[in-house]
Amino acid sequence: MLQLDQRPRRLRRHPWIRDLVREHSLSAKDLIWPVFVIEGEHRREAIPSMPGVERLTIDHLVEAASEAKSLGITSMALFPVTDPAKKDPRGTLALDPENLTCRAARALKRAHPEIGLIADVALDPYTSHGHDGVVIDGDVHNDETVAILARMSVVLAGAGFDVVAPSDMMDGRIGAVRAALEQAGHHNTLILSYAAKYASAFYGPFRDAVGSASALGGADKRTYQMDPGNSDEALREVALDIEQGADLVMVKPGMPYLDIVRRVKERFGVPTVAYQVSGEYAMLRAASERGWLSWDKCMSESLLAFKRAGADAILTYAAVEAARWLAKG
Ligand code: PBG
């Protein structure tokens, strides 16, 4: 007969004991809901590569925020869809306090002042070439771009955003954004830096959703977003952004980069956010639609995995659905 000193399975025999000893859990309060905003009224548009996600006009967005709030979701990240006719090489519309993003923020703040609002800071929704910055002599020009992003951040904070989230991967932008916010009196605006953002093919469906794929026309962002082969470099990027004044840092994409989430959290111990990006959402959705995976089980498991890896919060397009599952228990 087998004589064992240790039988780890004892801790797994019943739901009550598994519940007692579980190390990590997911709550709706961990979730940040990214949404796509469109011009107009009473319209919602399906996104073919992201089934279940819709682009919403501001009125629908305000309504959807009520449901999210009632399910315990406390923050949202806004992504505007810009009419191609309004894009130009410098992304001028980014600095207009009356642009769609700013109007959406004001409407949401009026209706739901307690919801935390996060603005993406990058020029890609506004540039005719689809890059996150201005292009000079074929290069996405770092310093010119940073100057614009700093002004853009002040405009966004003025519109009511609680958090500005630079997602462009230019050098020195966190310091410039922090200085501009301070100078404009926005001392309490948080900076969530997309500190370790990789040049990933998993952003495909997002670029369909906001229309930057067609603007990019096959170009990639490898001269500014990180090389997927690198890990130590992520730590250097995060260190710089913390030094320059970031309050929270992000790793993106999520599931293929959980090792980075873990290293960042362990090394710096700062609030660490992971982004389950559009391609990750689409993969799980597509396989589930084919009957190959269980949507709710696999999505829930992947969100819990972010927590286990060390993420404090997770951006996910499935936030509202996941919150519904969590509410049911
Ligand atoms: C743009 C931005 C991107 C995402 C968030 N902000 C795309 C990109 O860098 O091209 C991707 C999000 C997703 O795929 O869900 N600065």
Image: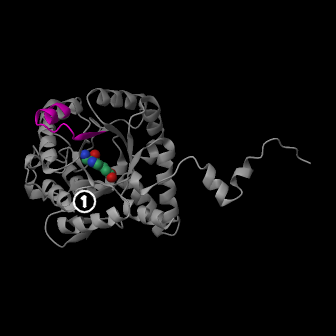
Q: In which quadrant of the rendered view does residue 283 lie? A: bottom left
Give the percent coordinates (x, y) of residue 74: 33, 55
Disc 1 residue type (three-letter): Phe
Give the percent coordinates (x, y) of residue 215: 19, 52
Give the percent coordinates (x, y) of residue 38: 18, 63
Residue that appears at 17% across and 40% down: 133
Give the percent coordinates (x, y) of residue 285: 43, 63
Q: Which residue is mark 1?
A: 36
Q: Is residue 244 visible?
A: yes
Q: Nearer the viewer, residue 68 or 314?
A: 68
Q: Nearer the viewer, residue 148 or 165?
A: 165
277 versus 284 height, above or below: above
| Residue that protrudes farthest toward the front in the picture | 114
Q: In which quadrant of the rendered view does residue 5 lie? A: top right
> Label 1: few (<14), some or many (≥20) within 10 Å?
many
Residue that appears at 20% across and 63% down: 111
Q: Is mark 1 within 8 Å of ligand 1?
A: no
Q: Nearer the viewer, residue 20 or 95?
A: 20
Colour setup of the view: one colour
Horizontally, is 143 left or right of 318 in the view? left
Q: Which residues are magenta?
A: 178-193
